[in-house]
Image (spheres, helix red, strand yellow):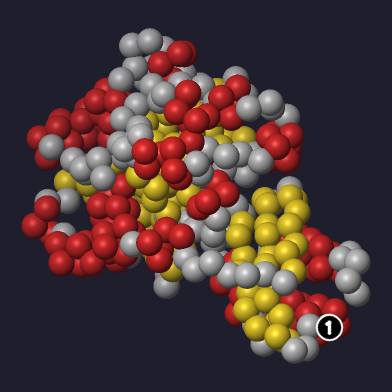
Amino acid sequence: MSYLLAGIARAVWQQPHYLLFMGENMITRTRIYISDSTCPYHNLAIEEHLLHLVEDGECILYLWQNKHTVVIGRNQNALKECNTEKLEADGGKLARRLSGGGSVYHDLGNLNFTFLVKERDYDVDRQLSVIVRALEDFGLKAEKTGRNDLCIDQRKFSGNAFYRHLGRCYHHGTIIVDVDLENMTKYLNVSRDKLRSKGVSSVKSRVVNLKELNNSINIPDLKRALIKAFAEIYGAEPESIPDRDLDREEIKKLEEKYASHKWLFGKRMKADLSLSRRFDWGEISINLQIQGDSIAEVQVFSDAMDETIAELLVSCLTGVRFRLESIVDVLRGLEGKLEQEALADIIDLIKTQEIW
C-alpha cells in the first residue's frame, strides 16, 4: 500500500489543488490506514484505537468496509431502529458506534471513511472537501446538505457523524457505491416522522448509489481517488500506518466491547413515564422510573448528532424530585453543554406533559 500512496502523492504535487487549504490549520502530517477486515466490531475497534494514536498537527484517513451490517448511533434503541431478528437470521451483524446520529446499513458496496485529528485541527468542511474532490475524478458533483449528508442532485449518497473525546475528534461517514437498497429497507426501521421531515416516502427513495450515476465507479478506484484527494487537500504526502504500529491487545479489548450484548442493547428498564418527540435536530425519547417523589432511573434514546445528549440528561435527571420546577431547574444547568435549541425543546417537551 505504501508504494501506491507514494505514487499518488508524487502526482499530486504537480497539480495546484493542494494549495486550496494551505495555512488554514497546523496539519503538517497525513497518514492512512486501510482495513482488510469486513467485521464491524474489529473495524470500530481500530477506529477508536487510531483516535488514541493521532498526534498534534496530524490527520489520519481510515478507510474500511463492513459486510452485511446495521450500524446504529451511540444513543439509539437497537430494537426500535433495526429488525434485529431478521438481520441475525440472515447472517448479518448489529453494531453500535461511538458517534451520534441515525442507523445505517453497510455491505461491501459501501465504503466507510474516518478522518481523525486533534480538536484544534478539526475542520469538517476541509475533511468533506476530500470526498467532494475525489468524486470529481468520476465526473460527479457533490454538495453538503442538511445536518450531516452529502448529496448529488438532492439524493443522498453519504451520511456523516462526529465524535469528540479528550481533545481528539473524528468525523466518519459512508459512501454508497453499489449497496443493496432492498436490504437497507428490509433491516432499517425508520420512523414515519423522520421520513416526513425529509420530505420522502421511504429510505430507498432518498438515497442513490454512485454506480447509478456513473456505472464505471468501483470501490478500488474510489479508494485511490480518496487517497489522491487527501494528499491534494492537505498538501502533505500521506504515510501508510504499518500494522506493527497498532496495539493488538488494545484492539482485541475494544473489539470485545463492541461485540458485547451490553454495548449493543444496554439494559432494559421499566418506565413509569415515557416522553418522545421529533425536532429539527433529531428524535428523542426520555424514559423515567419514579420511586416515591424522585426520579430513580433515566434512560434516553436519540438520533441527535450530539452523542453526549443522553449521558448529560441521565446524569442531571437521576435523583431529582419528580416536580416540574425541580426538573426544569436541573435542565437549565445544562446551558452551555447542550445546544440551546435542543435544550429549549427538551424543556418544552417536559413542560407540555399533561401530568403536571
Amino acid type of the residue tagged 1 in the rendering: Arg
Q: Position of residue 152 (x, y in %)?
A: 55, 23
Residue 143 in view (yes/no): no
Q: Which part of the image, by quadrant, shows the N terminus? A: top left
Front residue (pair 298, 272): 272
- Give percent across and percent down for residue 35: 22, 43
Q: Label 1: few (<14), some or many (≥20) within 10 Å?
A: few
Q: Is residue 113 left or right of residue 318?
A: left
Q: Indicate left or right for 69 with 269 as reference.
A: left
Farthest-out residue, top: 215
Residue plotted at (68% across, 60% down): 285
Q: Nearer the viewer, residue 205 or 54?
A: 205
Q: Does residue 250 show up?
A: yes
| Image-quadrant location for residue 254 | bottom left
Closer to the camera in the image, 82 or 59: 82
Image quarter hosting the C terminus: bottom right
Q: Which element type, helix, strand or loop, lies under badge 1? A: loop
Q: Which residue is mark 1?
A: 323
- Direction from residue 151 to residue 134 in the image, left or right: left
Count of numbered labels shown in the rendering:
1
